[in-house]
Image (cartoon, rainbow, N blue to C red):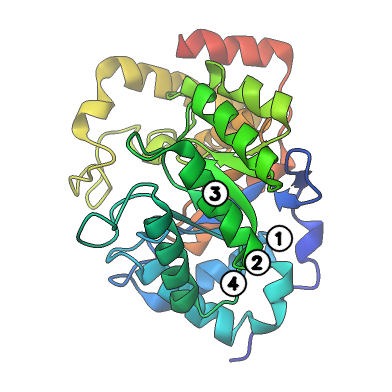
């Protein structure tokens, strides 16, 4: 059946300016970190991607190693881009990254110019795109001069392989230096992608302040703490859940009694707000002025729709924020 995009897609999403740039991003973006690899059900992937676009999600976020196996998420996105979304390419923001292990040998990870440029070329081939909208350095490299890594990002723009560049997992000091270097090259740092959620707040220790001061957007990943900030584990560990499957990203030790007391208290307040815990956790991040968008994953269309509905209730009173803070400390 032919796909026809919803004519009301842009009425259903809130869009925020990314730092000091001219780019608007949807308040909720779709990350293809999990559930879009080679071992998944392609039909479900396609349904999620198309429904996301119909809900106004214009930003699909990838990395070279997303899968598994590495690269397969980019390949699967290519199939949807070429078939159903071909005529909408200019309505989409496609981002990818390089920094983690992608292939064997000394040039298959980290932040050298050799690795970043080769990885970007591979990503473009996998997605059969002429360019990506955003290309990230996925993590800082302690052994490579930051100038070399940033010069590679600059070169990607100069060569027409990326429209914008960003960084991910850089701390406040590293971010400030990276922004300085990129500005000196004439290629501004568009955006930073850190891990951030109610239980992992390291970005509040200087990074958000740097981003605001320097005019850099922020798009947190893992805003739901890999599912911990949902109602999924309120009554234990469901069969087939991420913890039950011994995920390296979320283990049984994350469900300690102290954490679960907080999760249940947060869930109770979310219900009082007329939201799910996941929706409140996403709104809590988006309430901060430095945040451009949040990256969600999705394993089903229903899960996607529920989390996108967050945009309909983003406001908190001061008393609410203080109450939530009291739960979290």
Task: Identify which residue is drawn at 55% across, 68% down.
Answer: 49
**Is residue 165 placed above or below 163 in the rendered structure?**
above
Asked if disc 2 and disc 1 are in contact, CB closer than 8 Å, the reply is: yes
> Is residue 136 at least partly visible in the picture?
yes
Asked if disc 4 and disc 2 are in contact, CB closer than 8 Å, the reply is: yes
Residue 56 bears which disc, if any? 1
Q: Residues under labels 2 and 3: Cα distance?
A: 33 Å
Q: Residues under labels 4 and 2: Cα distance?
A: 5 Å
Q: Which residue matches tag 3?
A: 151
Q: Residues within 10 Å of mark 4 (few under 14, many from 20)?
A: many
Q: Nearer the viewer, residue 249 or 298?
A: 249
Q: Residues within 10 Å of mark 3 (few under 14, many from 20)?
A: some
Q: Is residue 137 left or right of residue 14?
A: left
Mark 2, secondary structure of its residue:
helix
Q: Is residue 311 left or right of residue 197?
A: right
Q: Position of residue 95 (x, y in %)?
A: 56, 59
Mark 1, secondary structure of its residue:
loop
Q: Residues under labels 1 and 4: Cα distance?
A: 10 Å
Q: Residues under labels 2 and 1: Cα distance?
A: 5 Å
């Amino acid at each position: 059946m032919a796909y026809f995009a919803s004519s009301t897609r842009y009425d259903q999403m809130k869009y925020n300016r990314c730092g000091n740039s001219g780019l608007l991003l949807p308040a909720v973006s779709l990350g293809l970190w999990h559930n879009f690899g080679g071992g998944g059900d392609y039909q479900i992937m396609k349904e999620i991607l198309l429904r996301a676009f119909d809900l106004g999600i214009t930003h699909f976020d990838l990395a070279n190693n997303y899968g598994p196996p590495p690269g397969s998420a980019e390949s699967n996105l290519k199939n949807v881009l070429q078939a159903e979304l071909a005529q909408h390419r200019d309505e989409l923001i496609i981002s990818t990254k390089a920094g983690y292990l992608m292939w064997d040998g000394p040039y298959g990870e980290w932040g050298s110019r050799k690795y970043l440029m080769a990885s970007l070329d591979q990503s473009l081939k996998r997605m059969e795109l002429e360019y990506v909208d955003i290309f990230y350095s996925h993590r800082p490299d302690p052994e490579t001069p930051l100038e070399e890594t940033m010069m590679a990002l600059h070169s990607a723009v100069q060569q027409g392989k990326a429209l914008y560049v960003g960084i991910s997992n850089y701390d406040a000091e590293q971010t400030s230096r990276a922004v300085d270097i990129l500005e000196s090259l004439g290629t501004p740092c568009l955006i930073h992608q850190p891990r951030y959620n109610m239980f992992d707040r390291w970005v509040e220790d200087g990074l958000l302040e740097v981003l605001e001061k320097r005019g850099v957007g922020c798009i947190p990943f893992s805003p739901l703490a890999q599912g911990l900030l949902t109602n999924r584990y309120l009554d234990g560990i469901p069969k087939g859940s991420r913890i039950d499957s011994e995920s390296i990203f979320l283990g049984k030790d994350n469900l300690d009694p102290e954490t679960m007391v907080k999760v249940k208290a947060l869930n109770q307040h979310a219900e009082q707000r007329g939201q799910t815990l996941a929706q409140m956790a996403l709104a809590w991040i988006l309430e901060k002025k430095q945040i451009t968008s949040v990256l969600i994953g999705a394993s089903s269309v229903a899960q996607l729709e529920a989390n996108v509905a967050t945009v309909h209730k983003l406001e908190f009173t001061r008393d609410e924020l203080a109450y939530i803070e009291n739960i979290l400390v």
